[in-house]
Image (cartoon, rainbow, N blue to C red):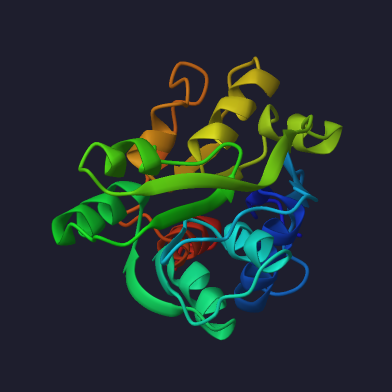
Amino acid sequence: MTVDQPILVLTRPQVQAQSFANACYAELGPDWPIIISPLQKIIWVDRDFDDICDVVIFTSQNGVQGFLRRARSHGRPAWCVGDKTARLAEENGFVIRGIAGDAATLIKMIAAGNPPERMAHYAGLYARGDIVENLSSHGISIRKIVVYEQVSRNLSAAAASVILGRKPVVLPMFSPRTARLLMHEVKGISQARVICISAATAAEIDRSRFPDTHVVAAPSGTAMLKAVLANLNPR
């Protein structure tokens, strides 16, 4: 590690954080300083649920995995947020009807077609975009089924120390809830560069404490990785 190497702090759930870290290591080398300190832990809902629906909606890979823990795809159509979510769903037998970069865009895509089928959003307890409420207001038959919960966790001492320290830090934020949890955990003023996946996520950041906050060009994992790499190692 050189003096000027920014430290990457990842606060996503462990599996997603490690996957993102591995993508960064692949581009920057295995010695790049990365701290993983999840602010949420995924807890699967270990109870049977009703999978009677014609079309499914997944807004995360965890939603797909949570569904598959208790049910099968049976070739059902699926609407997805994110390329990785869609890829995982397709690999497990779902027929991808559409992919959006964020929940707001997905709502518009679905509502425009006014589908007659019964739909279900398989998601976490804290889900983005109020998909069920918005689509219901368009007269679409839809309900939400919780297949996992996100339990908040404290920021590690190492992560908190570098976020409030003098060394350069890049701090990606992948959801509004994670941003809210960060604001609860970090009370001081930080010089960290915060990179947000969406304007909704950035809106949860207190700019008086994190003035160096930015939003990526597109709400996708690919755009986030590109932006993080560009800020870690400008060329």
The quadrant holding residue 196 is: top left
Q: Is residue 218 above or below residue 210?
A: below
Does residue 141 appear to the left or right of 206 in the view shown? left
173 and 80: which is toward the camera = 80
Residue lying furthest right in this view?
157
Residue lying furthest left in this view?
112
The quadrant holding residue 17 is: bottom right
Identified at 73% across, 54% down, the residue is: 48
Identified at 34% across, 38% down, the residue is: 199
Q: Is residue 172 visible?
A: no
Image coordinates for residue 60, horizontal then vertical, percent: 54, 58
Does residue 58 appear to the left or right of 106 in the view shown? right
Image coordinates for residue 41, horizontal then vertical, percent: 76, 43
Q: How many marks?
A: 0
117 and 84: which is toward the camera = 117
Image coordinates for residue 47, horizontal then vertical, percent: 77, 50
Q: Is residue 160 visible?
A: yes
Q: Is residue 95 above or below residue 46?
A: below
Q: Is residue 199 above or below residue 183?
A: below
Q: Quadrant of the N terminus?
A: bottom right
Q: Quadrant of the C terminus?
A: bottom left
Identified at 63% across, 74% down, the residue is: 72
144 and 164: which is toward the camera = 144
133 and 200: which is toward the camera = 133
Image coordinates for residue 109, horizontal then vertical, percent: 22, 59
